[in-house]
């Protein structure tokens, strides 16, 4: 994908849309795919650009509005997408790095403190065929955008899943080619140095292309995870997601935080397996949890609904999920755990302890026990993780759990800093995906 020259004539405005919700981010991705297809970009570049704007949209999503503008410029012929906002939000380094690898022509202009017009912007410019820009019919494009609207959010999720499948298949094809070339290079001897040099050039090219496709797959996977964490009085939340470093696949780890009629519901889960299919099972499972939580079910009933859904639509698959429901006032919490690692409760006055309420994993049709209630003190911290953080091939799990508890107890009280410490301590070159989810709970201020 080329970057056009910087000289521009006035562009033709095609679409301006406001982003406030996760569904708006789905729509932004759909608009980007529709427009890139209409102006002549190939399928691979359509997915790369749509994935980039989707990742930036979910990373920058706030209750305050953000605007996305789509322009088609005629000279030089280019599609320009601008995300802009009027507050001090900024993209995370992880998100900005990921999309810059996909599209090096991204330009980020941060907010300037004290400026007369506060806010920042991100601009993406990509070259398009000159004929597409010259013969542009704005009304036809707008009609095309309108006709591309899905019937439901599930349709958007399915479209995103299809792109994920296509990118993973491309990544796997590049990996197979890389393995084939590695075998040929191994068999090459000193007497055929000319052939060796030629294969080395081809090998490096395949490595670069495979790396790009794998980065695209991981970025797509992050769009299955929540765009933001809820703002709740008396609860400070922080989360970290780190993909496995030693595998070309993606995993089924997920997390969720949602305000419900019963209180703040926190969840961490893991679809058993490490593959494209595991990620595809994870996405609908997380969305189903949000939908069931809005119906005011107690935690163990939520798990039973998820178990039924998994057996009905994904027979043969299993998953572990731990739910923590924090009552309004933050004085009491309820734990329902379907086969997952126990959450860790940290208080100022007592030793750290694991909340060992436990039930069967999902997907096997066994009833879930009612959630166990625990009283909590002001300032208590709750830590939920997936097994990729602590499990190793050689160390007993009990020892790793004790090490995690000791490290967390001696770590900072701030949830964000605690997540960083745990990743620095346990997360070097992980063999499996990692999620660390931390919460600090204090009584909310009086109304």
Image: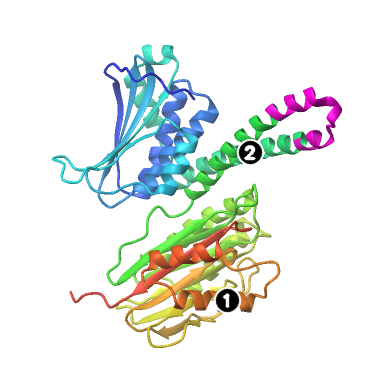
**Residue at the location (43% across, 23% down)?**
3
Residue 187 x %, y %: 84, 35
Q: Where, quadrant-wise, is the C terminus in this rendering?
A: bottom left
* Residue indicated by mark 2: 171
Indicate left or right for 385 with 143 as reference. Answer: right
Residue span colored magenta = 182-201
> Residue placed farthest to the left in the image?
116
Q: Nearer the viewer, residue 295 or 269?
A: 269
**Residue 146 image position (x, y, % from top left):** 37, 31
Residue 77: say if magenta: no
User: Which residue position is annotated with label 1?
Assistant: 401
First in sequence, mark 1 or 2: give its number. 2
Question: What residue sits 54% from the left and 30% below the top?
Answer: 44
Real-space CA distance between mark 1 and mark 2, rounded to the nearest whole angstrom? 35 Å
Determine if residue 55 is in view: no
Q: Quadrant of residue 239?
A: bottom left
Disc 2 secondary structure class: helix
């Amino acid at each position: 994908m080329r970057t056009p020259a910087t000289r521009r004539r006035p562009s033709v405005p095609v679409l301006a849309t406001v982003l406030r919700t996760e569904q708006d981010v789905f729509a932004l991705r759909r608009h980007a795919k529709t427009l890139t297809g209409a102006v002549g970009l190939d399928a691979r570049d359509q997915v790369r650009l749509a994935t980039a704007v989707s990742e930036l949209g979910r990373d920058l999503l706030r209750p305050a509005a953000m605007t996305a503008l789509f322009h088609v410029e005629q000279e030089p012929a280019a599609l320009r997408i601008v995300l802009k906002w009027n507050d001090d939000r900024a993209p995370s380094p992880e998100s900005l790095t990921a999309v810059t690898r996909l599209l090096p022509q991204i330009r980020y202009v941060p907010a300037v403190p004290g400026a007369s017009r506060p806010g920042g912007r991100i601009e993406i410019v990509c070259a398009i065929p000159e004929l597409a820009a010259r013969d542009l019919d704005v009304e036809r494009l707008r009609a095309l955008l309108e006709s591309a609207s899905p019937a439901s959010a599930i349709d958007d999720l399915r479209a995103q899943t299809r792109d994920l499948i296509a990118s993973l298949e491309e990544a796997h094809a590049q990996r197979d080619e890389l393995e084939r070339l590695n075998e040929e290079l191994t068999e090459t001897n000193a007497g055929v140095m000319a052939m060796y040099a030629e294969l080395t050039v081809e090998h490096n090219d395949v490595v670069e292309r495979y790396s790009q496709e794998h980065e695209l797959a991981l970025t797509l996977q992050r769009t299955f995870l929540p765009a933001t964490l809820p703002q709740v009085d008396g609860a400070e939340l922080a989360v970290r997601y780190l993909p496995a470093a030693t595998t070309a696949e993606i995993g089924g780890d997920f997390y969720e935080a949602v305000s419900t009629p019963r209180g703040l519901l926190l969840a961490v889960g893991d679809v058993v397996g490490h593959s494209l299919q595991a990620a595809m099972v994870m996405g609908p499972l997380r969305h189903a949890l949000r939908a069931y939580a809005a119906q005011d079910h107690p935690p163990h009933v939520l798990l039973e609904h998820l178990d039924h859904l998994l057996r009905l639509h994904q027979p043969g698959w299993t998953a572990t999920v731990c739910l923590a429901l924090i009552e309004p006032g933050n004085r009491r919490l309820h734990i329902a755990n379907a086969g997952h690692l126990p959450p860790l409760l940290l208080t100022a006055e007592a030793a750290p302890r694991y909340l060992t309420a436990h039930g069967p994993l999902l997907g096997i049709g066994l009833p879930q026990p009612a959630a166990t209630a625990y009283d909590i003190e002001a300032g208590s911290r709750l830590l939920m993780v997936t097994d990729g953080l602590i499990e190793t091939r050689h160390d007993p799990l009990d020892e790793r759990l004790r090490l995690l508890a000791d490290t967390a107890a001696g770590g900072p009280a701030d949830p964000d800093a605690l997540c960083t410490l745990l990743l620095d301590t346990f997360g070097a070159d992980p063999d499996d995906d990692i999620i660390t989810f931390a919460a600090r709970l204090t009584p909310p201020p009086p109304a």
